[in-house]
Image (cartoon, rainbow, N blue to C red):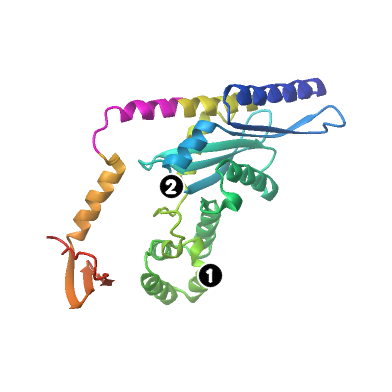
Amino acid sequence: MNLRHTCEFTGYTSKYVAAIRQYNHGSTAIVLVDNIERPPPIFQRMYLCFKALKDGFLAGCRPLVGVDGCHLKGAYLCMCLVAVGKDGNNNIYPIAWAVVEVENGETRSWFLKLLVEDLEKEDGDGLTFMSDRQKGLLDAFKLQFTGQVYKDAFWSAARCTTKAQFKRNMEGMKFLSQAAYDYLTAIPPQHWSRHAFSPNCKSNMLLKNMCESFNATLKDARDKPILTHMEWIRRYVMKRHYQKREGLKTWEGTQMPYVKKYLEWFVAEARLGTVFESQADEYEVEHRSDQHEAILRKELAVATIGS
């Protein structure tokens, strides 16, 4: 790309950002250019977060954000970074996106800093972020310890909801391989096992599939010029929100479809449990092959599972 085209493109991005700020009040639109003091200026990166998306996330989504990136295939070989949440029906909820010159610690920090400011969370307090660490963890583990038995053992430990259950599964891993056990114990469980996750996220997610789903949607826009790419995402999100609003007009009830389905499954599972009285407000619950201790406060009503 010659210098004249570089200058023209930088001018177009500045106008695009100015238009978003003018016609979408409260939205964040930022473009960074290099060589501003020594022309010609060169485009570096752009960040967009529309006010409607901020407000919707803060009003109706859990404080869980997946962050991921994908390569663009056009004349500018940049990266597109995306931040995606989950809505009340457990569907993906795009929050913000950016095009950066390369994906590294500096550009990710820049993206996350702007995102945290938009979500009005000082230092990210109260938010749970999911990155591609889990992908690297799993890929590295699979390379070193091949076979379905190791994969199953890994996911059994990752899905544990209690510390006792986690310890039992890790003992099973140790029986399989001391090396595999040592590899996983060297990584703090709050990074990969459900039982150690912060309760702030209020989610049972272990993978950032929400980001991968959104990136898969972007495949039709990845070979487009940067501004066309950004406009494609904006229009896609606009159409998606319209379809969601229209769909809700025909929905009846107090629970979203996903929530209703999950609660029905939970009730069915609960009926498989057997409760044994111990003393006062202490009980033992047998569910499938597991046994659990249940201690209820005296002021709570005790409901018998399966009644």
User: Does residue 61 belong to the magenta stretch?
Assistant: no
Could you tell me which secondary element the residue under label 1 belongs to?
Answer: helix
Residue ID at (53%, 60%) = 143
Residue 292 location, quadrant: bottom left
Secondary element at tag 2? loop
In the rendered view, does 306 fall on the left or right side of 168? left
Residue 224 in sight: no
Q: Residue at x 45, y 65 (%)?
A: 196
Q: Which quadrant holds the N terminus? A: top right
Q: Quadrant of the C terminus?
A: bottom left
The foreground one among 15 and 233 is 15
Percent across and percent down for residue 274 are: 17, 68
Say whether residue 8 is left or right of residue 163: right
User: What main secondary structure does the magenta stretch of the protein show?
Assistant: helix
Numbered disc total = 2
> Which residue is pictured at 69% across the width and 31% down the height?
76
Residue at the disc numbered 1: 183
In the rendered structure, the answer to whether residue 223 lies left or right of residue 126 reads right
Q: Is residue 88 above or below residue 123?
A: above
In percent of width and height, residue 296 lies at: 26, 70
Residue 74 picture quarter:
top right
Q: Where does residue 81 sit, x and y in percent of width and height? A: 59, 40
Under mark 2, the amino acid is: Arg
Which residue is disc 2 drawn over? 62
Q: Which residues are magenta?
A: 239-253
